[in-house]
């Protein structure tokens, strides 16, 4: 492709991520000039004729299968995810996104490797539903990197990573893990809720299915439930088919709230970063603090090379761990996790 447009002018500069979250998915020309798409509350579609209905000659076929409102959010997320994203599916919650993504790649008799620092309900789903369906799960050290090769079995079909990990915030070497997985014919799934595509485009680093609990940062106002799965070209067909056959969809009002929240995502994450650094400093100086990880803020949390791959900086979240006995919590091998009596240091 030439560096200039057909009329001889240079193409416009690529929009920065903070600009894309504001403009992506919008098509004012289709909505009489209005900036935002209307909220379509829809189920049944009308066709011009029976022949059109039988031939599915329509852009939209049924409310559950998509509307201009859901399409706007899907296209916006696809643009933010980057060129390796072949499609996005919207789900009713983050956990629904995790479970649907897993179901799209495994079947009875398969084995799944899941990071030991995964979101708790992910583990519950694997030990509950997947186990009942004949899928076995084992857990690996999030800092093992390419050493995960030793954890593979002949029937390992998927590797589930989360970086940074929930609560303990270890930074996994996703690229090294993905290379091993692909060499062995496995699919890589990542819970990318903490970083979002603004800080880490997971699909650019070997991930096949990137998952977000849009309830958190995309929504941003504690007033919606939303899950998203972004797929590359190798996994998008299976993902879309699993969503369709499972009868899953997102309500129109939650989709609208997701679109609204998306527009301020970059600004809010910058504020999270500043607050996180401040809280991290306070937690590290607090009496009784024995472990403190702060990805991208000078505190050890994994490979520095891995942390450098995050866009600009990483720091919406910080973690400070009190001594288990002193805080009334429980310390597990390798990871100190406070399960009760959390101490709040400073103010957000």
Image (cartoon, rainbow, N blue to C red):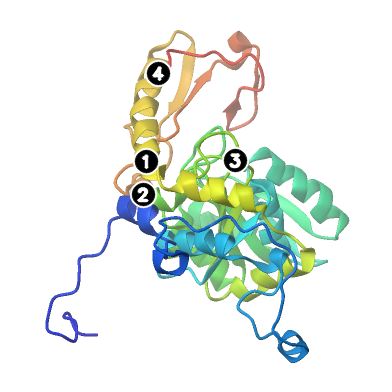
Q: Residue shown at 67%/57% (left/top)?
A: 41
CA neighbours of label 3 inside 10 A, class few (<14), some (14 to 19), many (20+): many
CA separation in Å, label 1 and label 4: 18 Å
In the picture of the structure, the residue carrying the numbered disc 3 is 117
Height in image: 334 above or below 16?
above
Which is in the foreground here, disc 1 or disc 4? 1
Q: Which residue is mark 2?
A: 310
Q: CA distance from mark 3 to mark 2?
A: 19 Å
Q: Quadrant of the N terminus?
A: bottom left
Disc with the residue nearer the chain's start (3 vs 1): 3
Of the numbered discs 3 and 2, the one sitting upstream in the chain is: 3
Dividing the image into 4 quarters, which one contains the C terminus?
Answer: top left
Residue at 51% over, 62% down:
72
Give how far apart the Cα atoms at labels 4 and 3 are.
Answer: 21 Å
Task: Decide which of tag 4 and tag 2 comes sooner along the chain.
Answer: 4
Query: 10 Å neighbourhood of mark 1: few (<14), some, or many (≥20)?
Result: many
Residue at 50 percent of width and 45 percent of height: 218
Within 10 Å of disc 4 (Cα), the crowding (few <14, some 14-19, many 20+) is: many
Give the side of residue 41 with respect to residue 29, left or right: right
Q: In front here: 255 or 181?
A: 255
Q: Which residue is mark 1?
A: 314
Upstream in sequence: badge 1 or badge 4:
4
Q: Which residue is mark 4?
A: 284
The residue closer to the viewer here, 141 or 19, is 19
């Amino acid at each position: 492709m030439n560096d200039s447009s057909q009329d001889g002018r240079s193409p416009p500069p690529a929009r920065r991520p903070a600009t894309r979250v504001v403009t992506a998915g919008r098509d004012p020309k289709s909505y009489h000039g209005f900036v935002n798409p209307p909220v379509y509350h829809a189920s049944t579609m009308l066709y011009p004729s029976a022949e059109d209905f039988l031939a599915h000659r329509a852009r939209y076929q049924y409310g559950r299968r998509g509307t201009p409102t859901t399409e706007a959010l899907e296209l916006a997320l696809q643009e933010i995810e980057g060129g390796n994203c072949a499609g996005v599916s919207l789900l009713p919650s983050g956990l629904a996104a995790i479970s649907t993504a897993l179901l799209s790649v495994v079947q009875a008799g398969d084995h799944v490797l899941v990071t030991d620092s995964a979101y708790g309900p992910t583990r519950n789903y694997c030990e509950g539903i997947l186990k009942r369906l004949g899928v076995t799960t084992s857990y690996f050290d999030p800092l093992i990197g390419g050493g995960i090769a030793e954890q593979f079995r002949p029937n390992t079909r998927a590797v589930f990573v989360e970086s940074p990990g929930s609560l303990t915030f270890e930074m996994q070497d996703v690229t090294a893990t993905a290379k091993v997985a692909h060499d062995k014919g496995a699919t890589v799934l990542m819970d990318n809720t903490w970083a979002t595509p603004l800080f880490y485009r997971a699909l650019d680093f070997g991930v096949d299915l990137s998952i977000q609990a849009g309830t958190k940062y995309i929504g941003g106002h504690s007033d919606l439930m939303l899950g998203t799965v972004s797929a590359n070209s190798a996994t998008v067909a299976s993902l879309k088919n699993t969503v369709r056959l499972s009868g899953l969809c997102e309500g129109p009002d939650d989709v609208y709230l997701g679109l609204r929240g998306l527009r301020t995502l970059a600004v809010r994450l910058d504020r999270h970063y500043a607050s996180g650094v401040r809280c991290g400093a306070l937690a590290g100086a607090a009496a009784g603090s024995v472990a403190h990880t702060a990805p991208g803020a000078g505190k050890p949390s994994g490979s520095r090379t891995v942390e450098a791959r995050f866009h600009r900086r990483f720091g919406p979240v910080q973690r400070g761990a009190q001594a288990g006995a002193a805080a009334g919590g429980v310390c597990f091998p390798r990871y100190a996790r406070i399960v009760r009596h959390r101490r709040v240091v400073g103010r957000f």
